[in-house]
């Protein structure tokens, strides 16, 4: 595959790849960096991937794996600024308690595997359906349900331990 064929095949997916990477990482600069890494990986394997039937799905899978690698390496805090701007309740003490609970959950989430973090974030923070998560991650729906169940159970059990 030459340079022009590569550009025609993979560059049209740039916007979609950015949206997926941004949803996973919640950072535009990191998302762009991951997309560049994805394109580098695709370019280095260009001779092997000339026969793939669905270039878009293949590039999404490579992007997802690159994002998971990035999350594993950096153990990013998955909370964004808007997560801390929860509307205040009646009193300051309630707000402080909510923020403390959110910090505990964030800490517990950082202990999850990259895949569990990703699926949990896509489901509960970004509001994706199981079908959409299946398309983004390449996981089967049954696997998604198992990953969510185990992640929720781990967070619940560990949170209850913290409260005691």
Image (cartoon, rainbow, N blue to C red):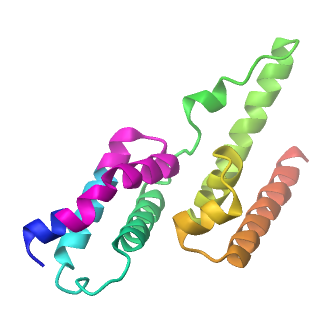
> Foreground: 87 or 108?
87
Instruction: Determine the residue positioned at 47% across, 48% down.
Output: 25
Q: Main secondary structure of the magenta part?
A: helix
Picture layout, residue 134 above or below residue 22: below
Instruction: Tell me, yes or no, if residue 91 can be seen here.
Output: yes
Of residues 49 and 95, the one drawn nearer to the viewer in this rendering: 49
Left-right relation of 119 to 55: right
Q: Does residue 148 appear left or right of residue 9 in this picture?
A: right
Q: Which quadrant would residue 49 be assigned to in this image?
A: bottom left
Residue 126 point in image, percent of width and height: 63, 46
Q: Is residue 107 left or right of residue 53?
A: right
- On the rendered image, what quadrant is the N terminus found in? bottom left
Coordinates of residue 82 in the picture (x, y in percent): 60, 28
Q: Residue at x 26, y 64 (%)?
A: 10
Residue drawn at 41 percent across, 59 percent down: 70
Percent position (x, y) of residue 130? 69, 63
| Nearer to us in this view, 77 or 28 | 28
Residue 86 position in % (x across, y down): 72, 24
Magenta residue check for 13: yes
- What range is drawn magenta here? 8-32
Q: Is residue 45 above or below residue 121?
A: below
Q: Is residue 130 part of the magenta span, yes or no?
A: no
Q: Front-most of 152 and 8?
A: 8
Identity of the residue drawn at 50% across and 54% down: 75
């Amino acid at each position: 595959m030459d340079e022009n064929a590569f550009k025609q095949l993979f560059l049209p997916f740039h916007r979609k790849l950015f949206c997926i990477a941004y949803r996973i990482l919640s950072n535009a600069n990191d998302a762009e960096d991951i997309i560049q890494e994805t394109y580098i990986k695709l370019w280095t394997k260009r001779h092997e991937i000339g026969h793939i039937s669905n270039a878009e799905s293949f590039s999404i899978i490579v992007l997802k794996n690159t994002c998971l690698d990035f999350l594993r390496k950096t153990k990013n805090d998955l909370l964004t600024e808007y997560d801390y701007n929860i509307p205040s309740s009646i009193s300051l003490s309630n707000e402080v308690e909510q923020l403390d609970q959110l910090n505990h959950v964030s800490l517990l989430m950082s202990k999850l595997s990259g895949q569990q973090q990703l699926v949990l974030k896509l489901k509960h923070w970004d509001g994706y359906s199981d079908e959409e998560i299946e398309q983004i991650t390449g996981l089967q729906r049954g696997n998604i349900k198992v990953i969510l169940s185990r992640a929720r159970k781990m967070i619940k059990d560990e949170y209850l331990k913290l409260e005691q």
